[in-house]
Image (spheres, helix red, strand yellow):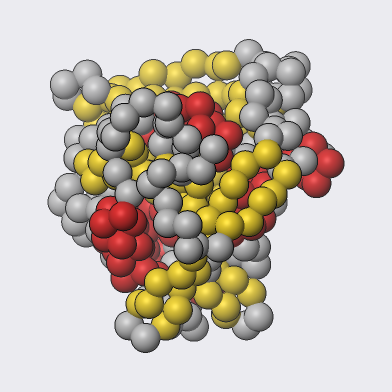
Amino acid sequence: MVNRFLSPSIHWIHRLLLITFLWGTSFTGYSQTLLEYRADRIDVNGIQRDYFIYVPETKSGYFEMPLVLNFHGYGLSAQDQIERSDMSALAQKEHFIIVYPQGSYLNGKRHWRVGSYTRASRAEDIAFVEELIDHLSEELPIDKNKVYACGFSNGGYFSLRLACTRPDLVAAAASVGGTMSQENYDGCLTSRGVPVFLINGSQDAIVPLQGKSAKGYMPIRTVIQKWCRKNDCNYRNSQKFTLDCAKQNNVERIRYIDGNGTLRVQQDVVQGGGHEWLNVEGCGYNASRQVWLFLRRFSK
């Protein structure tokens, strides 16, 4: 069935998401699904920027849907993120539109501009996101009060940068295997606090929990404290519990609540987890689903 919201003139790609084969990880409940993606591009100040989009098929009439922007990691691509996160099947099930923007090249590697290791970049990534949201809102039934950002590694850094610099664009943001650069942390001065969710592995050697001062990677705890302040949460008044999964991969979750008793900041640490889109085989912990369960709580 062709989705009636999509222009027939747009080029389509078909992709069989064999996640287990490609990545050696079982993404519980959502893999091995044949889905259709639209490949498109927009002009951003004279530069062509690419993206892939998946719009869920609906049997009911017209209704506005949330939009999730899912950003790939450094040196990876939008296609990699489609396969790595396997989030499109979840989008079909939960009825949200998902977009995988394509980063531009820096020293031969695709990236998102976040300072630190991308300091030499001149990519207008924030403008790209703004133009992309406006463009898609003109042609698709998007609920602009429910636009969300998430990403892996460098894409997680960028999601948090977006929440800092343009809190008017996104209702919430999530990072998997990411943190904030020193520059983005210091420059995060907006008063409005966007709800955020960070998922990190305890054994991540690329983006370790304690950060990397030499590279300008902020410690995860410091980043959480900043977002708690921005969201009027008492950092010391947190809810800490363990999601019992496989014996070697318990997930420690900390929830931070504001003065109204509303969840605003959340952190998951996957024990034994590395630098990956974190999932725990055998217990149903799926990073894509956990990200969505957090994001969908919020509206601008």
Specify the quadrant of the image occupied by residue 284: top right
Image point (38%, 46%), residue name = 5
Specify the quadrant of the image occupied by residue 33: top right
Residue 223, x across and y down, in percent = 40, 47
Residue 29, x across and y down, in percent = 66, 24
Q: Against 98, is 282 above or below?
A: above
Q: Against 229, is 124 above or below?
A: below
Q: 127 or 57: which is nearer to us?
A: 57
Image point (63%, 56%), residue name = 13
Which quarter of the rendered picture does the C terminus lie within? top left
Can the viewer see residue 219 in this picture? Answer: no
Residue 296, x across and y down, in percent = 35, 30
Q: 295 or 18: which is nearer to us?
A: 18
In the visual, does 180 lie left or right of 65?
right
Residue 110, x across and y down, in percent = 59, 71
Q: Against 20, is 169 above or below?
A: below
Can the viewer see residue 166 in this picture? Answer: yes
Image point (35%, 77%), residue name = 44
Q: How many marks?
A: 0
In the visual, does 203 lie left or right of 99?
right
Specify the quadrant of the image occupied by residue 64: top left
